[in-house]
Amino acid sequence: MDAGGKRFAGGVNVVERIGDAVHRPAGPWTPAVHALLRHLRAAGFTQAPAVRGTDAAGREVLDFVAGEVPDYPLPGYVRADRTLVAVGELLRRLHDASAGFTPPPGAVWQLPPREPAEVVCHGDLAPYNCVFRDGELVAAIDFDTAHPGPRLWDLAYTAYRFVPLSAPENPDFTAPIGEQVRRLRLLADAYGLDAGQRGRLPETAARRVRALAGHIRAQAALGHPAFTRHLAEGHADLYEADAAHLDRQRDRLAAA
């Protein structure tokens, strides 16, 4: 390892920092993701890492974004209303900047594209993929799960993680239903959803969380070590329970 290098084990990847750059495992989707990141920067969205290319080992190389990347249990600043507003505004800017993106020929995405392909979704905009400095959101990272899709599909998952829209028994982070309603409205306002989109958001969140549970099971069946571990730890069952909570509270959340 180069002097000053550091390794970080994430949920799926092992990431290495060398100086002011991050070296991450590449995949078939990396060329499309790099094209997207370059497009975002050219479109004026700077709250994502800049692309440097690949290293001699074939890993992707990105700018290191200084700050704190939180994990569960979440620190108080992640649960603050100001963070929820900042996340909604960041995702809206990201989506707007991506709307004019044309994927390269033969583009491969880790997650399947979804119709209508209004924007390019981040795919996993959650606290553990955000960088904070002094409690303020500064950037989104880890675009591996980016894929074309509807705005609402992406926002629904961010709402699930940041509101949060989880069942009372979820040990990571939950809130009473009245607080979920209030915070969901705050996020919808920050993003700028119209009335029709707001009404569909809770049902979309339930489908998005079930898709995540299905993704874990599918990847575990293929022998992926990280997803095999996640399945054994009960993550898929937890997401199914949260989706059932969203089904039960759909009307009340939609009224937000």
Image (tube, rainbow, N blue to C red):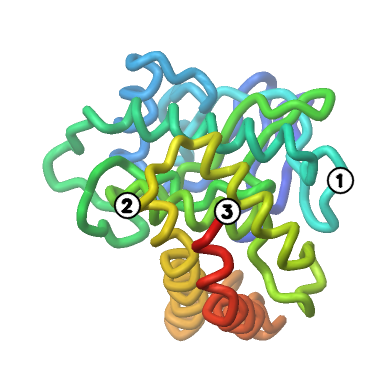
Numbered badge on residue 159: 3
Q: Residue at x 29, y 41 (%)?
A: 119
Q: Residue 15 lies in what quarter of the image? A: top right
- What SS does tag 3 mark? helix
Q: Name the residue: 22% across, 28% down.
A: 100
Mark in the foreground, 2 or 1: 1
> Height in image: 223 above or below 117?
below
Which circle's residue, 3 or 2, is located before the other in the chain? Answer: 2
Name the residue: 49% across, 18% down.
Answer: 46
User: Where is mark 1, residue-wise?
Assistant: 75
Residue 139, quarter of picture: top right
Query: Quick one: 132 or 65, which is closer to the camera?
Result: 132
Query: Is residue 250 shown above or below 68?
Result: below
Residue 150 placement (x, y as % from top left): 30, 51
Quote the CA–CA distance across marks 1 and 3.
17 Å
Q: Residue 78: x and y, percent?
A: 77, 42
Residue 189 placement, left or right of 214: right
* Frontmost residue, 75 versus 256: 256
Q: Earlier in the sequence, mark 2 or mark 1?
A: 2
Check disc 2 and give the amino acid type.
Pro
